[in-house]
Image (cartoon, rainbow, N blue to C red):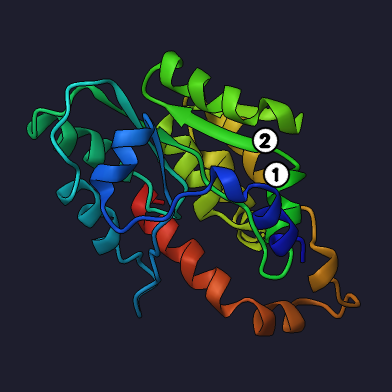
Amino acid sequence: PGLEELLARNRERLRFTLAIEDVFGRARMALVCVGTPSTYSGDADLSAVWRVLDELPEFEERALLVMKSTVPVGTGEKVRDELDSRGLAHVGYVANPEFLAEGTAVQNFMHPDRVVIGGFTNGDADMVAALYEPLGAPIVRTDIASAEMIKRFPRDAYQLHQRDCERLRGDGRRRRRRGARDGARPSPRLALPARGPRVRRKLLPERRSGAEAARRELGL
């Protein structure tokens, strides 16, 4: 709902292309929204993420990659290392995970309960924060790994693995818990009468597998 109206309202500003060169010919900030489907083990398939790096054109101007896709904790560090090894130190990287639900994505994006931003530099994070200013949503600023962890621990997984969150150490622990906790509010679309652990176990196999993968990434 709302997508048709949104496209009509912004039709003069929209451009569609299959060439990434066109993207950086017109903009200096690119939001990476590629699929990272879960494998059988619950790990994320990052082939589309690496394909974005492979297709980056050569340019000298400052640019910024903003990762919206769900990626394992530590992906940002690997992307940063890869960019540097390719002579693309002038390309910044920010983790900005999305929290959209099927059927309400437009509403979720335009009226978020929080925006999570993790950057290697304050300048890059400031650029992304400015992008969201018109929405008036709370901004949760973290480091890269914390932003990735907040997304990898979905609502139910945070509740199921709250003790593991307590075991995390470092300056970003409070912000990580805040970012995950704010997303732990039950969705009205998923609300069901309380029927105990049996229902929870039946409802959450995908979320559990994702949480287990995140736990492996963190060494918990």
Residues at badges 1 and 2 in contact (C-beta under 8 Å)?
yes
Residue, far right: 193
185 displayed left or right of 214: right
203 displayed left or right of 70: right
The correct choice, above or below, for 1 with respect to 206 in the image is: above
- 10 Å crowding of disc 1: few (<14), some (14-19), many (20+): some
Residue, far top: 123
Q: Report helix, strand or loop for mark 1.
A: helix
7 displayed left or right of 79: right
For the N terminus, give its image quadrant. bottom right
Is any atom of residue 122 visible in this view? yes
Task: Name the one closer to the observer, 159 or 126.
Answer: 126
- Look at mark 1 in the image and give the residue it sits on: 181
- Look at mark 2 in the image and give the residue it sits on: 178
Q: Position of residue 156 (x, y in %)?
A: 67, 62
Q: Quadrant of residue 91?
A: top left
Residue drawn at x 48%, y 66% is 210
Residue drawn at x 50%, y 62% is 211
Residue drawn at x 35%, y 55% is 17
Q: Position of residue 166 (x, y in %)?
A: 58, 40
